[in-house]
Amino acid sequence: MVKDYKYLGITIDRRLIFIRHVADTKRKVDFKFNMIKAITNLKIGVNTKMLITLYKSLVSYILPYAAPVLLLACTSAL
């Protein structure tokens, strides 16, 4: 029997508590934020406008996708 199934980017488990999906989403967002943090620590003079552009292009599309699933997720997963 399959424990998890990925359909349209959403990881569905047998109990529909979406713990794996939440963990995968958190891992993706953390990775992207760490990329942005690394860029801000460089001394190349990254301005605020560039940081906002990076956020919008790297992070902002991840959270709204399947947002209803995140709302239905088990509270212990969040």
Image: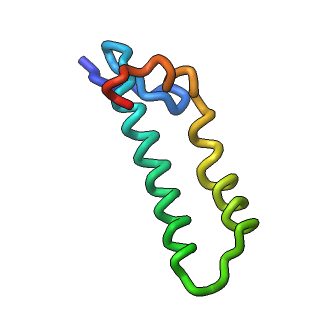
Residue 16 drawn above or below residue 76: above
At a point 70% along the width and 59% down the height, the residue shown is: 52
Q: Report the residue at 41% width, 31% height from top.
A: 21
Rendered-image quadrant of the N terminus: top left
Frontmost residue, 51 versus 4: 51
Q: Position of residue 33 (x, y in %)?
A: 51, 58
* Residue 48 quadrant: bottom right
* Count of marks placed on residues: 0
Q: Is residue 53 above or below residue 23?
A: below
Q: Pinpoint residue 24: horizontal percent, then vertical percent.
A: 40, 40
Q: Position of residue 61 (x, y in %)?
A: 64, 43
Residue lying at the far left of the rendered structure: 1
Q: Seen in the image, is 4 located left or right of residue 58?
A: left
Taking 25 as reference, is 35 above or below it? below
Identity of the residue drawn at 49% across and 49% down: 29
Looking at the picture, does residue 38 appear above or below residue 63? below
The residue positioned 32% from the left and 13% from the top of the image is 15
Q: Residue furthest bottom?
A: 43
Question: The C terminus is located in which quarter?
Answer: top left
